[in-house]
Amino acid sequence: MQSITFISVAEKKKCQANSGESCFEGFDEQAGQVTKAFPTIQDVARVAKVSTATVSRALSYPERVSKETRRVVIDAIERTGYRVNQTARNLRRKQSGAIVVLVPNLGNPFFSKILSGIEATASREGLNVLIADTRQPQVSPRLIGEYLHANRADGLILLDGAIRPDLIPGAPDRRPPIVYCCEWNEDNDLPSVRFDNSGGAALAVRHLHGLGHRKIGHILGPGDNVLTREREQGVRSALGALGLEARSDWFFDGDFSLAAGARAAAHWLALEDRPTAIAAANDEMACGFISGLHRAGLSVPDDVSVVGFDDIDIAEQFIPALTTIRQPRSEIGESAATALIGRIRGGGSETSPEVKVLGAELIVRSSTRAA
Amino acid sequence: MQSITFISVAEKKKCQANSGESCFEGFDEQAGQVTKAFPTIQDVARVAKVSTATVSRALSYPERVSKETRRVVIDAIERTGYRVNQTARNLRRKQSGAIVVLVPNLGNPFFSKILSGIEATASREGLNVLIADTRQPQVSPRLIGEYLHANRADGLILLDGAIRPDLIPGAPDRRPPIVYCCEWNEDNDLPSVRFDNSGGAALAVRHLHGLGHRKIGHILGPGDNVLTREREQGVRSALGALGLEARSDWFFDGDFSLAAGARAAAHWLALEDRPTAIAAANDEMACGFISGLHRAGLSVPDDVSVVGFDDIDIAEQFIPALTTIRQPRSEIGESAATALIGRIRGGGSETSPEVKVLGAELIVRSSTRAA
DNA sequence: CGGCGCCATGCAATCGATTACATTTATTTC
DNA sequence: GAAATAAATGTAATCGATTGCATGGCGCCG
């Protein structure tokens, strides 16, 4: 709303000339035109010849005013070009009208679909979506703490499991409702919406086993990540259940990046006894792995089968098309937003489950084949 | 900030018991502990034994209060756990403290890096970033208009060239400063930050020409998009300058999607006289094209050379690694945010250029080779 | 020493809406 | 037809900060 001149110079002159009230209104009765840049509820009330309370009610509780009055008010709003000042409304209602989404690395396309789901749901509910990147170099815990405070947002969605709201100073009642999405933190029991990561990883392993593979490796995500642990654990327990060996030299370190996949390929190539199939903890690493092998003159799935995880856009068009574990990303965003909004509106007495787990699905394409 | 009980039941009792002021303060003098959930500037003033004006000044204009007072105020803020209520501040200052970024399809990873640049710059300047997806089905022009109004945001970045702020009803002085980013609209002259699209497309064509290709085709973006037109025009004029033919059956329709690239591949395969090189209007279509050919048993760059556009993450790890035109996406986001903030703070008297063009760069990888 | 000006601070109006409570008007009930 | 009840509207306090104006204290100058 930057700098505002409520009454233009031309109008001021007119004002001195006729000293009428319509001048202060900023509403030119003659022309029936809007002349004030930012009419307030007072202006509407004046034009509609009712009190501001009535205007407010006509907007917020239409059933509380008579049909006739409603019409008059709507009409006045249109004539003045009035828009509710959200800031004033929020101040009075003690809310911020926004939810904050804390994203680790906004540049990562994995999050954009989730964000899209969140945004769709939130905007449908009349909430603004504020985003902040938690991994920007200049972002201090101090600033994060700022976002976690209730007077910044009505609610918070954390896509970054490393953020721990329970560690910020100040009583928990200064925090708005919080929901983790995708990731979570094992050191607190805040509600979360997540995929069945270990189940998905198990699907991948069983798929490979079903194709006859008995030597199965895994490319891990970054060490400090909860998804990494879940997916690894899913792989290990599936291997165990199938009576297969989990050889430590077949578990390659990674960090969810394409480059990490390429590095894993180099390690794979250096092995004496190579696994015949690889389950990667995400699609990027699977692609990087395939790409690394390709540069070495090997081919997927001829030389090794590869399963990814996530089903990112490119997976389907990659060469070879990537067999992967699909997670409904847009859906998880919607689900997290819905859960959060429930908590915001519910005001504490919450009956919905603390943890919601969304199923994952195996998508078979061309990067896997019989051993 | 949802529903708030300012004084807990336990405290109320204590309050009746000793009827002291410290009760109303919500600050337990004995323990030196914070007991009020949301202390206000009044509480700080009381604890610091100064007026609210002084507290406010100590925060906003530290040089306006004495050193001693500043210390006392800071101390009181820490003891009470006070945080500025941004809503109240914004109301008084007639600002919203936020910029809105209107994105066409948030799910598209192309935008996430740009968003990241915008967010980094804005948060450094103390502005919140609000995002909205303009292509959600339930988003009406009405709602977009809501975002375009100055009392929603202090400024606006449009990543969607199809949005036309000049068409919304109401005087232009009800709009906050606006900057287009990446895309723009030819029907108005709002400031914009963009890449050199035609120059980039020309780079691609000259690269192919330099490799000896004389039959060059192009896969277009969606018809209504300004980038599509610029890139096509860049291709055509480069072809012209090199004395090459721009054959209409070598210009394939597309829409920036992977699938469109695959469709173009089908069309290419169906041609009698095929171009030996293709410049795609973006990387996704280039990948889709390559993938489509691969499924037909053909290979890039052996059978045809392909240049993409954008240099998305996957380009480097695609098989073959994609030759493409790199655009500094994060940088354009920063640049747009900087331009916008300049306009917000500058308050109208703006000297920076209305259109800023960022250069594009050719990245040669393995999807192109000599004819 | 009186007057001027500056500095630090306080008082109170203000931003623009919402809403508890009061008041008026209409409707129902006996 | 009077009393009770319900519906519609108005009055004014309120949300929590910022800031124009007023004031008191202090130093400086002639």
Image (tube, coloured by chain):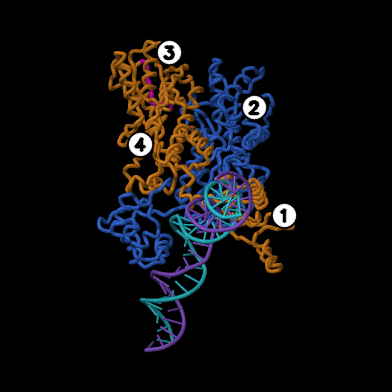
Chain colours: A blue, B orange, C cyan, D purple
Q: Are marks 1 and 2 in contact (CB under 8 Å)?
A: no
Q: Amino acid at mark 3?
A: Arg
Q: In what element is the residue under mark 2?
A: loop
Segment colored magenta = B276-283
Task: Find residue A278 and report its image quarter.
Answer: top right
* Camera-side mark, 1 or 4: 1
Measuring from the top left, give residue B336's x and y in whole percent.
Answer: 44, 34
* Camera-side mark, 1 or 3: 1
Q: Which residue is mark 3?
A: B369
On the same chain: label 4 and label 2?
no
Q: Are marks 3 and 4 in contact (CB under 8 Å)?
A: no
Q: Which residue is mark 4?
A: B190
C-alpha distance separating marks 1 and 3: 74 Å
* Camera-side mark, 4 or 2: 4
Q: Is residue A317 above or below residue B163?
A: above
Q: Amino acid at mark 2?
A: Asp
On the same chain: label 3 and label 2?
no
Q: Is residue A111 above or below residue B294?
A: below
Q: Which residue is mark 1?
A: B32
On the same chain: label 3 and label 4?
yes
Residue B204 magenta-highlighted? no
